[in-house]
Amino acid sequence: MQSYIDEARKAISNPVLQGALANLQDRLGKGAAAAYLNLAEGPDLRLKAHELRMQSINNLDVLLETLAAQVAKNGGRVIFAEDAASAVAACRDIARKHGVCAVVKGKSMVTEEIGLNAALIADGIEVTETDLGEYIIQLAAEHPSHIIAPAIHKTRAEIGALFAEKLGIAYNDDPPTLTWEARKALREKFLAADMGITGCNLACAETGHIAILSNEGNIRMATTLPNIHVAIMGMERVSATMEDHDVLLRLLSRGAAGQKMAGYVSHISGPRQPGHEDGPETYYLIILDNGRSRILADKRFREILCCIRCGACLNVCPVYAKIGGHAYGATYCGPVGAVVTPLLAGINRSRDLCLGETLCGACREACPVHIDIPRMLLELRSMLADGDASWQVRRNSPLEKAGWMIWSWIMQDRRRYELGARLMKRIFP
Amino acid sequence: MNLECISNQTHFLQKIRTALGQPAAAGRNFHDVFSDARSGSSCLLNRINNRSTLDRKLLLDRLIQEGRLLNLKVISVPTAADAARAIAELARERAPEWSDAKSLVAWRHPLIDSLNLPERLKDQDIPVHVPGPEPADAGLFRLRAQTALIGVTSADYCIAESASLVLKTRPGQPRMVSLLPSIHVAVISEDQLLESLAECYALVKRDPDAEKEGLTCCMTLISGPSKTADIEAVMVHGAHGPREMVIYVLAA
């Protein structure tokens, strides 16, 4: 994966990006740490959250069955998708069946993972990203470089020039003015759209609702105005009860942006009810596997399914701070990406990601659900060193492995060691 | 659900059971695995029901303080008439954004009705639109909400520790009133204040009236005006939703 090294080098030699990344970490990284301290239960609530998430993951079959039954009871339709292709096919079917012309999207990493936008656009549907950062990225035809701050790598001057070109407005580089231009342009898209597509931060099995967080209000727009709402969730993003959600939503808001609660939290349990003035008439929830059951089956890596994709680990990682999100070359970047990407996309293919992190442990301490990312990075490295049949991992370097085996053999016996030492003295006097 | 969906679900869940090392037909159900947290909830309900006047005043102080950090104005008013006067004043001061003329949209709700806003705004010639009783009126109401300067709602609860309004969706109380207008104003009573999200969820789950209604199809938490920091991390209010937000709290 030469691109990792090339992209990292490019990022490191880009002073604007370096400044933006430093600013991001200074603001969000420190913000999250401070916000954990103002929890009524104290920062150790993260340990409890870890237990809650592990209990959910260990009983995922029960939770998903309950969730599906509750959503159906509330009038929603549930689709189980084994892989990216079937999730995309389901979305295209829904769009075709309802004659959809225009889609507005809430920010969702899982739709990036399955490559949904391109498929819908190929069907002649207009797809508009509505989170401001995602909108900027879409206009620029790039990919997000951060889980919650996708346009962190772009300067106000670049965005000003982009808006001047794409929206036909006079150039300016004032962030409020640019934001309000996007507000106007996107308002038209919201009002005209016939389908809203969002992700899902966390589903609740006992009630059948999904909680979706935003600060801009774009997700509320996408789930209130269009006639159809399709939500897509990774199958691990479910927790058992409202009590779990109380803990997890407070931690998610803190981890993501140092907030006590995200600006807007929509608890969506079904389509519009009789007599209501707004909300979609049809609501679908797509539950996606796409390689997650394979991770679930391996106890070494099951823990990564606790992740609620807040981006907190990116905001403290010394490697992310230098190389930015694009170097990771995948949907999920940063420390969590260094574990998830190899497991979803292939460990040999993504070996640079496992080797690139420092194992300093900052990510574990920043994680709202206290996932031990360094432990899993070590597991991945050991698989790369020794090979692993269950994940079809080839040894990264058989020669290096042989060298260490000889070294170990020599070190285990005094006579061999002394002989070796004498030999070395001859060679390097 | 059609047969294909059911077989998809069965196969999907079977794959998960295999991954978890569970026997094929494990037969476990939700309530066996996840013990009920009812005792914790009833303790919270007791706390909410036995709150003294002083406790409520402290919650109000907390709400005001947390709101300030979020650019959310929380203003305590003695009577509904004071709230109505304040809303009329706000309408006078602010310029319209989505239309040349000023207008308001409001929930159909006993507390909001009692403000008598149409009367209050008559001298400024500002119309106040409320959803009609017929479902067919919904389309027209949406057009009104799209161009309104101020949307007036009440709320089910308001959580002090994060300054979060909690709004369920009901007939006459659509989500767009707190979303499409340039300014969102909420009027609530002091006895709707809660301390924490845990109290809110305990009420939704265990309070006899609320439990029957459930979450409704959409329950929204709103903590301040719409905001973004996506351009060079500069905070800007009014990304998509209201650019300004005020809560008037009526003395109980």
Image (cartoon, rainbow, N blue to C red):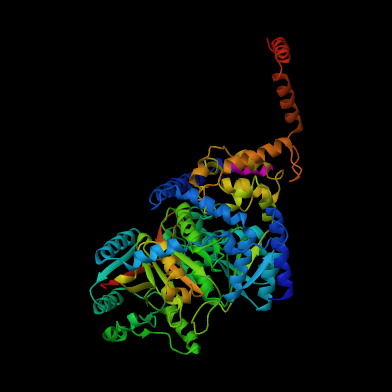
Q: Main secondary structure of the magenta part?
A: helix
Work out whether A28 lies above or below A193.
above
> Position of A102 compared to B248: left or right?
right
In this view, the residue in front, B59 or A343, is B59
Residue at image point 31% right, 71% down:
B191
**Can residue A160 be seen?**
no
What percent of the width, then of the height, locates residue A18? Answer: 50, 43
In this view, the residue in front, A286 or B37, is B37
Residue at image point 47% right, 52% down:
A255
In this view, the residue in front, A350 or A1, is A350
**Can residue A136 be seen?**
yes
What percent of the width, then of the height, locates residue B115? Answer: 29, 81
> Position of A407 compared to A216: left or right?
right
**Total marks placed:** 0
Per the rendered image, the range of residues in magenta is: A1-9
What percent of the width, then of the height, locates residue B239? Answer: 44, 65
Q: For residue A2, what is the image quadrant?
A: top right
Magenta stretch containing residue B115, yes or no? no
> Position of B84 compared to A288: left or right?
left
Work out whether A140 lies above or below A364.
below
Task: Name the quadrant of the N terminus of chain B.
Answer: bottom right
Residue at image point 48% right, 82% down:
A277
What percent of the width, then of the height, locates residue A183? Answer: 47, 68
Residue at image point 44% right, 62% down:
B39
Task: Name the quadrant of the C terminus of chain B.
Answer: bottom left
